[in-house]
Amino acid sequence: MKCGIIGLPNTGKSTFFNFISNSKALSENFPFCTIEPNYGMTKVPDKRLYELKKIINPIKIIPSEIKIVDIAGLIKGSHKGDGLGNKFLSHIRETNVIIHMIRFFQDMNVLHVEGSINPIRDKEIIDMELQLKDLETIENKLENIKRKNKIHKSINILKKVFSFLKEGKNIRMYPFQGDEKKYITDLQLLTIKPVLYICNIDEKLNNKTHFYIKNLQKIIELENSTLVVLSLKKNYIYYEIEKILKEAYKLLNLQSFFTVGNKEIRSWSIPNKCTAYEASSVIHTDFQKGFIKAEVIHYNDFIKYKSNKKVKEAGKIFLVGKNYLIQDGDIIHFRFHQ
Ligand SMILES: Nc1nc2c(ncn2[C@@H]2O[C@H](COP(=O)(O)OP(=O)(O)O)[C@@H](O)[C@H]2O)c(=O)[nH]1
Ligand SMILES: [Mg+2]
């Protein structure tokens, strides 16, 4: 699972990346200081791990992790190769979810590539670059189909999505009917990816209610996306970072299950609607190869009864097969042939 951070230069992307990931990016007051993307891992915050810890008292707890990519260099004209150009768009293509950083801090010493502070304009610049790239991708696909002179089921939906983009809209908003979406998934379009917006506001003015922010909020709500407003230069942002990671996790349609032992309690990320069989491979392919059954305790039952023994007495350990759909928070013990 990969989460990419995008936005205009000098908005605070690398600063944010450094906050949340286990590696360090160069954060400088220079628009193109990051050329290659920075990769790091971040732990997914989950209070339930600590609730379980209180009961079991293991040696350690291990939260699941998501990969974070700090992608630099997007500016007006990137889709046709301006700035450090096109290359960045391919880094975005590899991600599953996007965090879009928008600047609202004033700082004469930190250059703004557009020369002034205007979060809505900035958001639109980035959105438009991605939309232009998607238009190009779809155009190429349509031409390709035409060249092969084949009647292709995807033509209809491609054309509809094309006009949608032309109106300046992101494809994630497109009202797909039936199985339409499946005809465009192979294109890995950029504006179809779920997005979480962050507005990095001024640490001194702390102006969350400025009309710029209010308008930005409205626009983003209309897109069914989420905006988090914070100041990266403030010291107490840990709580907000946790909120952001949780939102990103939700956007990715992820849920967690736990494995619990005396030595460690660990959380694992899986997609919603994941079967026990699929989930077993997240731990180890051997678990899946030799899958026999899984013992499942629902999180709330464990918190209520507080021990395996009591859960068992209450009849709340379920022995399930391959097709069991995991519920968020399930505590699972896999039985498998070795
Ligand atoms: N005053 C102020 N400066 C910031 C803030 N966030 C980032 N900066 C500064 O802006 C410059 C660029 O930040 P960076 O994270 O590298 O931006 P990036 O180009 O988007 O990766 C650095 O000098 C940061 O210290 C902020 O909230 N307030
Ligand atoms: Mg940077």
Image (cartoon, rainbow, N blue to C red):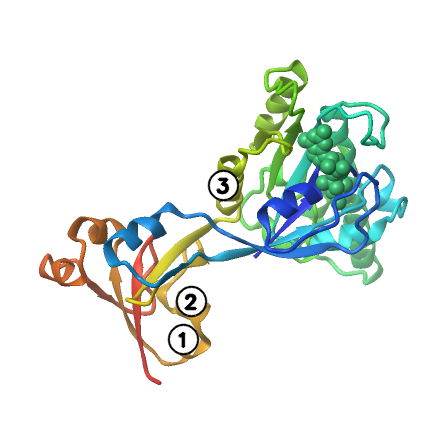
- Name the residue type under label 3: Glu
Which three-letter amino acid code belongs to the residue tagged 1?
A: Gln
User: What is the number of the mark on residue 278?
Assistant: 2
In the rendered structure, which disc, 3 or 1, sits on the residue that comes first in sequence?
Answer: 3
Give the label, 2 or 3, closer to the camera.
3
Q: Position of residue 289 (x, y in %)?
A: 41, 80
Residue 133 placement, left or right of 321: right
Q: Nearer the viewer, residue 259 or 80?
A: 259
Q: Are marks 2 and 1 in contact (CB under 8 Å)?
A: yes
Q: Which residue does the image show at 29% across and 66% down from the upper left?
A: 261
Which residue bears the numbered disc 1? 288
Describe the element under mark 2 as helix, strand or loop: helix
**Residue picked out by circle 3:** 242
CA distance separating discs 2 and 3: 28 Å
Of the residues under marks 2 and 3, which one precedes in the sequence? 3
Q: Nearer the viewer, residue 223 or 58?
A: 58
Locate the C terminus by quadrant.
Answer: bottom left
